[in-house]
Image (cartoon, helix red, strand yellow):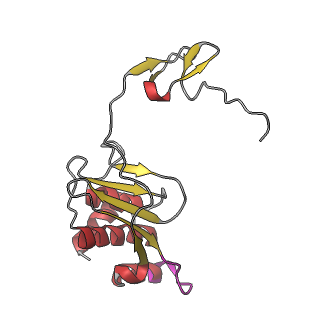
């Protein structure tokens, strides 16, 4: 692992922790196994299944960000990352293996950073397709609160176009 990558990730994240180490190791594995480089636009896409510390490493080291549309959150809660290379169609999903033993925080961080990625992650093809490129949507003014929202997030309620905050979900108990 490049010490510069660890330092860059720590500076961005604000502190060192095992979760950040997982993200750094995931990026290292994706670069090694897929040959990905920093994504200036949407050449590389990462689908993260968690919203934990490691995602900060993915952002700063790959250029995958929510704002560019090439960092996508898929909330399974799993410590898993799927990388896609739009240029050549390559893809790879990695999920952390269970740790064999309990470790103190610093010991776990060192273990993650210094152990080969194949011992830390299980690797497979993603079970879902490459997400489409980011789109820009027209804005619609919510007829309830007056705030602007993208058209694909608008719902009809009592004949009015409303945003998700104003929309009252209908349900009958199950």
Quadrant of residue 170 in the image?
A: top right
In the displayed structure, would residue 41 be above or below residue 124? above
Using residue 62 as the reference point, say whether residue 157 is left or right of it: right
Image point (30%, 52%), residue name:
64
Quadrant of residue 92 in the image?
A: bottom left
Magenta-drawn stretch contains 113: no
Nearer-the-camera pick, 71 or 91: 91
Nearer-the-camera pick, 53 or 10: 53
Quadrant of residue 174 in the image?
A: top right
Nearer-the-camera pick, 160 or 103: 160
In the displayed structure, would residue 171 be above or below residue 73? above
Q: Main secondary structure of the magenta part?
A: loop
Q: Position of residue 41 (x, y in %)?
A: 22, 46
Image point (55%, 60%), residue name:
77
Image point (48%, 60%), residue name:
52
Q: Position of residue 8 (x, y in %)?
A: 27, 64
One can see residue 16 in this view? no
Stretch of the chain drawn in magenta: 97-107
């Amino acid at each position: 692992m490049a010490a510069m990558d660890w330092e860059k990730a720590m500076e961005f994240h604000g502190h060192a922790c095992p979760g950040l180490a997982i993200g750094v190791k995931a990026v290292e594995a994706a670069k090694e196994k897929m040959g990905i480089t920093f994504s200036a636009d949407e050449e590389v896409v990462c689908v993260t299944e968690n919203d934990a510390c490691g995602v900060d490493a993915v952002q700063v080291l790959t250029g995958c960000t929510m704002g560019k549309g090439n960092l996508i959150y898929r909330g399974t809660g799993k410590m898993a990352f799927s990388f896609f290379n739009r240029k050549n169609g390559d893809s790879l999903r990695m999920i952390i293996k269970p740790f064999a033993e309990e470790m103190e925080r610093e010991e776990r961080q060192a273990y993650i950073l210094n152990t080969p990625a194949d011992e830390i992650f299980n690797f497979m093809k993603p079970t879902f397709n490459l997400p489409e490129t980011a789109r820009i949507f027209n804005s619609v003014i919510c007829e309830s609160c007056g705030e602007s929202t993208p058209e694909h997030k608008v719902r009809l309620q009592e004949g009015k176009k409303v945003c998700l905050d104003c929309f009252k979900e209908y349900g009958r108990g199950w």
